[in-house]
């Protein structure tokens, strides 16, 4: 059974960098045709795709966030990570990691982590 | 790109039907047959229930159905049950490995 688990600081200061890791268990991250992504949800609001990575290292980012986001993968540890720089209060949200299908099938998020709340405050 | 537009809330009594709309543009909803719907209970992760506009994920009852006309997709829940009370989010492929979500709709079973 595939499981994803987010980890990282739950509190980040304004202007600093948010760093989260998603540990994948129950399957290899080196799987063809599936991508590993990050989705966030501000309190009481809808979902927002942040970006995704393939095990080979190819990345895709949501255009409005592209300048501040870096997603990387560590296949030896079966995990992938998110870094978001220059955070503001607008970045406060629950951050989910997820596995999704390719664009050929419309990018379906089929497996999700439980989510981690990140607060931005000094 | 802008989020898809969903009504913030919807409601219905047990046994009734309710439809939730999801409006985008010709660059997302109207341009692809890749609209999905997710159900999310409070404090939980979303779960995929509908994909490719109208296909149900495994284990999802046929009380849930999806459709699309032009730039607007819809999720209909028939025979409402108490367990259907949740937040529902639509999403659409938007080209170039891009995906966009709606703002979410809180469904209340009266």
Image: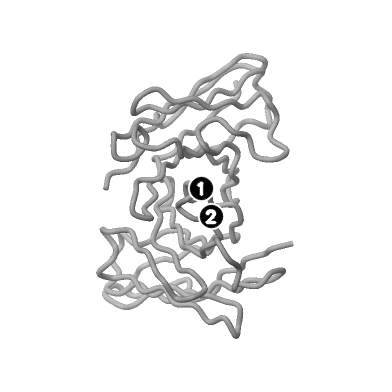
Q: In this view, does A15 lie to the left or right of A104?
A: left
Residue at the far bottom: name it: A76
Where does the image place residue A110, in percent across and percent down from the top left?
59, 52
- Give the label on residue B74, or none: none
- Residue located 26% across and 75% down the image: A15
Residue A22 against residue A37 in the figure, above or below: below
Q: Are marks 1 and 2 on the same chain?
A: yes
Q: In this view, does B94 lie above or below A57?
A: above
Q: Do the residues labelled 1 and 2 touch (CB within 8 Å)?
A: yes
Q: Can you tell which quarter of the image residue A119 is in?
A: bottom left
In this figure, which colouring scheme has been used for the structure?
one colour
Q: Residue at x 34, y 77 (%)?
A: A17
Q: Mark 2 points at which residue?
A: A101
Nearer to the camera, B71 or A68: B71
Tag 2 secondary structure: strand
Residue at 51% from the left image edge and 65% from the top image edge: A36
Q: Which chain carries label 1?
A: A
Residue topped by disc 1: A105
Residue at horizontal 28 percent and vertical 66 percent from the top:
A66
Q: Which is nearer the eye, B52 or A116?
A: B52
């Amino acid at each position: 059974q595939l499981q994803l688990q987010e980890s990282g600081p739950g509190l980040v200061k304004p202007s600093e960098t948010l760093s989260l890791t998603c540990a994948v268990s129950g399957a290899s991250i080196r799987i063809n045709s599936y991508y590993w992504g990050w989705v966030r949800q501000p309190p009481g609001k809808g979902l927002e795709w942040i970006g995704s990575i393939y095990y080979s290292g190819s990345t895709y980012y949501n255009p409005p966030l592209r300048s501040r986001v870096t997603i990387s993968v560590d296949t030896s540890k079966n995990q992938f990570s998110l870094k978001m720089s220059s955070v503001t209060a607008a970045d406060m949200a629950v951050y989910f990691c997820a596995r999704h299908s390719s664009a050929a099938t419309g990018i379906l998020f089929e497996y999700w982590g439980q989510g981690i709340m990140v607060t931005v405050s000094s | 790109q802008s989020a898809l537009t969903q009504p913030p809330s919807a409601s219905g009594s047990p046994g009734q039907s309710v439809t939730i709309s999801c409006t985008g543009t010709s660059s997302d909803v109207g341009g692809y047959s890749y609209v999905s719907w997710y159900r999310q209970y409070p404090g939980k992760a979303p779960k995929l229930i509908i994909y490719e506009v109208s296909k149900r994920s495994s284990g999802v009852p046929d009380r849930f159905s999806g459709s699309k006309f032009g730039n607007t997709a819809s999720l209909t829940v028939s025979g409402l049950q108490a367990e259907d009370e949740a937040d529902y989010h639509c999403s659409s492929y938007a080209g170039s490995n891009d995906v966009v979500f709606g703002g979410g709709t809180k469904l209340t079973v009266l």
